[in-house]
Image (tube, rainbow, N blue to C red):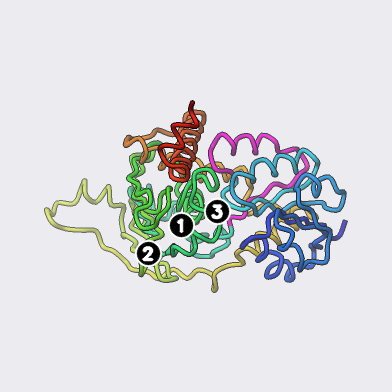
Amino acid sequence: MDRVRLGVVGLGNMGSTHIKGHLPQLPRFRLTAVCDVDPKRMEPYDVAKFERSEDLIRSGLVDAVLVATPHYAHTTIGIDSMANGLHLLVEKPISVHKADAERLVAAHRKGLVFAAMFNQRTDPRYRKVRDLVQSGELGEIRRASWTITDWFRTAAYYASGGWRATWAGEGGGVLLNQCPHNLDLYQWILGMPERVTAHLGFGRFHDIEVEDQVTAFLEHPNGATAVFTTTTGEAPGTNRLEIAGDRGKVVVEHGTITFWRTRVPVGGFLATDPGSFSTPEVWRCEVPPAPGGGGQHVEILRNFGDAILDGVPLIAPAQEGRASVELANAMILSGLQKRTVSLPLDAAEYETALQGLIRESRHEKKTAETGPADMAASYR
């Protein structure tokens, strides 16, 4: 095989963008099939068309599947794809909740390439910061903060699809739609915390039932703490990542990396220096990442194809997508129950809580549609 026959399931914003904008740059792929519940979305493509993912998967026309559907279907279509021997690339998040993510990962079969669309892992700034942290240049990590409020969305955005911003259709708000990228980068760079305490605004800025504002406090096993802040209702937004360690701090903002490096370890200095108000000598360095923003979606797709054809390592193995799902779930559960949540998260507990939110939402919508009198009659 010198080219990968690819089927795309889900032709909304991302699915159509992959086909029209990304695949033309990748000669090692050949689009051979598409699938969508809306036949009109498939009309522009001169390939096999299916309204059911099951039929595309069993057609014999594809070697790999790219899943770009609403979130809940990532799990079911992904499991079906791998059960039928197909390589799989799934859009973020890999699943809505941890239990489904574990089911999807458990379905992975030896010999199949299983990747996630975490395109921000290709950004040279975050690659460089990860290297600074993991190589020990920052020393032991003490504190981090990430303010990501540049995910601004209008009411029209949320009204563009009935599944958007609902517990039943999307499974969450900013944490499940926009921030899987940031949550993935957070754990990729800093590792997983052991406790999460979050304050969430549900429909704080938009007429939606899910979270559009989040402030979370994270505690790591070594005592390091972090604050994670995001929203889709603030403009102008900020994207600033700051990480402080025993050898200084690094800040990523406005496309640059600034490293304030202490000449000596901070812990040793504060324990031994005789001055009451002295501080360690600090050198300010502009750290040059590679130019540009990385290959993004195209690079993840190219890497997926190269992994299938040549066996190269994946940039974003889908198994690692469980971490961002777990972080999002922990923040939502903490916000709902107004308590600190310990990790690893109890997957069954969260799934039960999510099902309760879905039932409550459906009940409220039915009440609004039928009115109290009709609702009473329906129970007689």
Q: Give the residue displayed 20% in from the left and 58% down from the top.
A: 279
Which numbered disc, 1 or 2, marks the residue that appears first in the sequence?
1
* Residue 104 figure quarter: top right
Given the current orientation, which residue lies at the most extreme left position?
276
Report the Cα–Cα distance between label 3 and label 1.
43 Å
For residue 380: magenta?
A: no
Which numbered disc, 3 or 1, marks the residue that appears first in the sequence?
1
Mark 3: give few (<14), some (14-19) or many (20+) Cα within 10 Å: few
Cβ–Cβ under 8 Å for marks 3 and 2: no
Mark 3 vs mark 2: give the one in front: 3
Which numbered disc, 3 or 2, marks the residue that appears first in the sequence?
3
Q: Amino acid at mark 3?
A: Gly
Report the Cα–Cα distance between label 3 and label 2.
45 Å
Q: Position of residue 48 (x, y in %)?
A: 84, 58
Q: Which mark is residue 162?
A: 3
Residue with the mark numbered 2: 259
Q: Secondary structure at mark 2?
A: strand
Q: Is residue 55 left or right of residue 299?
A: right
Residue with the mark numbered 1: 132
Q: Amino acid at mark 1?
A: Leu
Cβ–Cβ under 8 Å for marks 1 and 2: yes
For residue 99: magenta?
A: yes
Mark 2: give few (<14), some (14-19) or many (20+) Cα within 10 Å: many
